[in-house]
Image: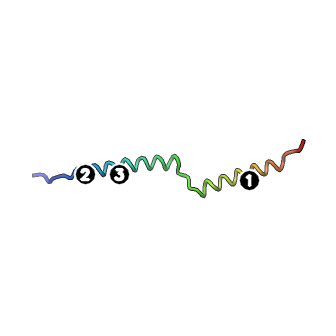
Amino acid sequence: MAEPVNLNRFRKQKARAADKVRADQNAVQFGRPKPEKDADKAQTDKARRDLDWHELDP
């Protein structure tokens, strides 16, 4: 005779797998760490400032 199966375990495993898939998708979409974002922002701000310094006054 077969052993009884706990259906809650399988339901929870399926839910965990779905959550992991969604988390992986979000990591790809939004997954840049804050220091990396700050560094990019600082680099673009510096480039903009440098460009402003080279403008000719009319």
Horizontally, residue 42 falls left or right of residue 5, namely right
The residue under label 2 is which amino acid type? Answer: Asn
Mark before the other along the chain sequence, 2 or 1: 2
Dot placed on the residue nearer the N-terminal end, 3 or 2: 2
User: Whole-Å distance between the Cαs marked 1 and 3?
Assistant: 44 Å
Label 1 crowd bin: few (<14), some (14–19), many (20+), radius 10 Å:
few
**SS under mark 3:** helix
Q: Quadrant of the C terminus?
A: top right
Taking the spot 84% from the left edge, 48% from the top edge, the residue there is: 54
Marking on residue 8: 2
Per the rendering, the mark at residue 46 is: 1
Q: Residues within 10 Å of mark 2 (few under 14, many from 20)?
A: few
- Pointers 3 and 2 in contact (CB under 8 A)? no
Going 19% across and 52% down the picture, which residue do you hit? Answer: 5
Judged from this view, the residue extending furthest toward the top is 58
Residue most extreme to the right? 58
x, y percent for residue 4: 15, 53
Q: Residue furthest bottom?
A: 35
Residue at 66%, 52% in the rendered image: 41
Mark 2 falls on what kind of element? helix
Q: Is residue 31 left or right of residue 51?
A: left
Q: Which label sits in the foreground, 2 or 1?
A: 2
The amino acid type of the residue labelled 3 equals Arg
Q: Picture coordinates of residue 57 (x, y %)?
A: 89, 44
- Mark 3 — residue? 16
